[in-house]
Amino acid sequence: MKISDLIGAIEDAAPRALQESYDNSGLQLGDCGRACTGALLTVDVTPAVVNEAIECGCNLIISHHPLLFNGLKRITGSTDVEVSVALALKHDITIYSAHTSIDSAPGGISWTMSSMLGLKNAKVLEPAAGKMSKLVTYVPVSHAQSVRQAMFDAGAGHIGNYDSCSYNIEGSGTFRALNGANPFVGDLNRIHVENETRIEVIVPDWKTRDVEQALLAAHPYEEPAYEFLSIANPCKSIGLGCVGDLEQPLAATDFVDLVKSTFGVPVARCTNVVNSGRLIKRVGLCGGSGSSMIRSAVGAGADAYITSDTSYHNFVDMADRLLIVDIGHHESESCSKAIFYRIITEKFPNFAVRYAHTDYNPINYV
Ligand SMILES: [Zn+2]
């Protein structure tokens, strides 16, 4: 099995097109064409993790945080990132990172956190917008069904819990085939009128090339007419954060205990609400630095919001309004390793994949 096969599995579940504009998810360094000798899963890439990969014979490291985030102007071994890059290159280790791509993907970090807590009716807290196009094409009526089906099979026409979604209307198309053309219907140098179906389907950005190729392969015309139109609609199944409901309301202190035991955190920073005796029913959450979505959690009716890297001023602003439960950055994203593990072993059940023992939480509670 090639390294590219494993990366393909990760990108099928978390396409790079889902990442935020500031991010650097994707291949960090190395060759994807080599046979994979084992995959090591980690939140962060450090020299210790690269050394562990060397020692355990894994030539692929899959991390949540990108090794290369701010760019490198020199590789002299003066930082851990530079040391990691040099070590990995020297030992032919490939490094791939899925950061905000796995944050936003269905089944990604926030979805996993929400299922760990047993939340019901979970939905995306901030659905992603601008990640889809509308494809419009014009097909002879006789071929509308086969072209439509080819586009569906390639990933078009999927909206929420529905597939095979399209809009179709019949009309007349005209064209004149000039010298050198090989028209499917009509004669050279004579205007032809053909009954055509205008088909409209939704296409996610990461399926654009697949759907385009399927359309071109199935369409009978020598020069099919089609256009991709960008649409701003939010896509409900992808985006950052989740919000859902506890099966039974819990007192704030009991809820915080549940959060601590679920995510294995020794201590959580909480707003005043923890001592209010208030019941917690609806819960928002976002793995990693999710303080920018506190207002969205309030807007979604959340009684509590679990995230990390919240500031003093977040606590002041929300003191008695929202139970913020800050569980720490590494703690909230540690489940990324289990997500990578699930994705790989579901597709390649017998493949050597392991968690990095040297991946650790750099923040100590003293
Ligand atoms: Zn993070």
Image (cartoon, helix red, strand yellow):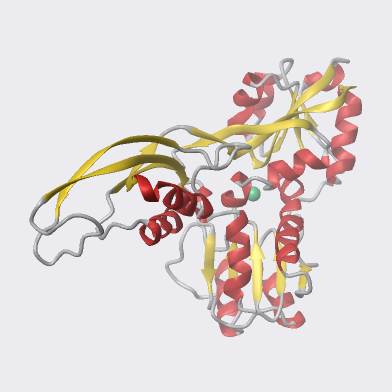
Residue 162 in sight: yes
**Quarter of the rendering occupied by the N terminus:** bottom right
Q: Name which quarter of the figure residue 57 lies in.
A: bottom right
Question: x and y percent of residue 134 in the render?
Answer: 40, 40
Image point (83%, 22%), residue name: 274
Q: Nearer the viewer, residue 114 or 324?
A: 114
Residue 60 in the image: above or below residue 299: below
Question: x and y percent of residue 313 in the render?
Answer: 63, 26
Q: Is residue 117 left or right of residue 144?
A: right
Residue 253 in the image: above or below residue 62: above
Q: Is residue 193 left or right of residue 153?
A: left
Q: Nearer the viewer, residue 335 or 233?
A: 233
Q: Is residue 177 left or right of residue 303?
A: left
Q: Is residue 304 left or right of residue 277?
A: left
Q: Name which quarter of the figure residue 60 lies in.
A: bottom right
Residue 123 in the image: above or below residue 68: above
Q: Nearer the viewer, residue 70 or 174?
A: 174
Image point (57%, 67%), residue name: 81
Q: Nearer the viewer, residue 183 or 255?
A: 183
Question: x and y percent of residue 349 in the render?
Answer: 77, 69
